[in-house]
Image (tube, helix red, strand yellow):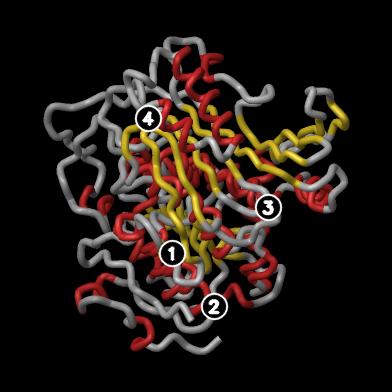
Amino acid sequence: MKPILRRSFLRGSVTAGMALAMPRVMLGRGPQAGSPNEAVNVAVIGLGSTTVVGGVGGRGHQLINRLRQVPGVNIVALCDVDQEHIDRELEAARSHGESPATHRDLREVLDRKDVDAVIVALPNHWHALATIWACQAGKDVYIEKPFSYDLWEGRQMVAAARQYDRMVQVGTQRRSSRFLPAVFDRLQGGEFGPIRLAHALVYRPRNDIGTVDAPTTPPPTVDYDLWCGPVANDPLMRKQLHYEWHWFWDTGNGEMGNNGIHVIDICRWGLGQDQAPPRAMSIGGRFAFNDCGETANTHIALFDYEPAPLICEVRNVVAGDDRSRIGNYRGRSGGILIDCEGGYFAGDFTGGAIYDYQGKMIEDLSQAEGSGSVEQAHLSNFLDAVRSRKADDLAAEAIVGHHSTACCHMANVSHRIGSHASPEAIQAAASGKPELADAFERCREYLRKNGVDLADTPATLGPWVTLDAEQGRFVGEFADEANALSRREYREPFVVPELDEG
């Protein structure tokens, strides 16, 4: 690899102030370019809260535990803007005989010469800047899902991986499943007839996050200005800083980007599609919660792939304690269904079965593969590529993550520029797409069972948005509104640079 010269590093900077905010450039590939058996020095950036309401136990915290199960890894640094998170992980590290350095600012981590690769588990609004700065500093990157905060940032992240010759893996760990490749080979090979449709399901009950009448003080252990980074340092207008950022458009991508990305990604894989769809539309809303959250808690998105489209259904609303009210589709409340002419596959990365359309099982494909083993395999795959320097070996390389995440962005953009519509108007809009019409009627019934009448509380009907994949921009009707939501304004010095995408 050629040395990264300072003039190249600063290209795309808006101001000299931005350059000062960047980490120093590391020349060459560093120690990871040695023997395939050589240990890789890793820093984990973003440790996460293990105690917040609604959270899943701190994503960075979870990844650290998986890293400890992968041979040939040294965890040399930990980074988080919350000192409480650092203290927690440092105590655990010492109990494992580790002595990592600690930092509040990720730029200090990227300046370290003893760091070969970084594991990034920050809020979505930090994904692009952390990834690009790391690539520019000569580090390889494992970036948590969703790949990017918006479409434009995703393209810059892919460009950074290419321009700086970095290994960039996206944390869509189902791509490292041992089970799915053989299933998809059979489906794509026509064993059950042509593929007609893919369904991605996220039926996950959640609670509302409440409201506040005045700004909330961030935890005293948090550097809130650094937490905000690229977004405005505005007063915190919700009860909880951590995790709830998922449900606000400035920092998150809703459940579509939070969990929808996993099943959308493997549906796209199952369909054999290697691009974002040419167009997408959506139906959804934030129902029942009456809280300060902004993103949809019920969302149907249609991605118009040819010859077989992809539909993603998100449901978060449950009235009371009866979680069964979330409903199911063909007996499933999560995972994927891929319809073929002669039957369909229903399952996930852990296993599944082939059924006929009367619901009778044709073939049991169950396989004991837990989420932990897949996650460990995904990290191992990344670290193997760090050693080999072969990006083609990555299970979820940057471009794979970008195309799948683009689906989530298209769904959210359609929703955000949509407008309230009556059930009859939505039925009319879906009339040419029978699978969409069916998904809407099932969604309408699920909401009714949870106390929401769409005749009184209308859903948002999002228009078709059309993507020019080569340009990475929306075109046609609604293009101006869609493109306005696909590239944000930044707060200096946290400005995502515009890189050469050639």
Q: Quadrant of residue 207?
A: top left
For residue 19, side relative to residue 188 (left or right):
left
Marked residue nearer the N-terminal end (2 or 3): 2
User: At label 4, which amino acid type do we have?
Assistant: Ala
User: Which disc, if any, is residue 307?
Assistant: 3
Q: Residue furthest left?
A: 214
Q: Which residue is mark 4?
A: 459
In this view, 229 is above or below 202: below
In this view, 347 is above or below 377: above
Residue 353 x/y as whole percent: 80, 32
Image mark count: 4
Residue 334 x/y as whole percent: 61, 31
For residue 425, side relative to residue 457 (left or right):
right
How far apart are labels 1 and 4 at the CA level?
Answer: 36 Å
User: At label 3, which amino acid type do we have?
Assistant: Pro
Q: Quadrant of residue 209?
A: top left
Camera-nearest label, 1 or 3 = 3
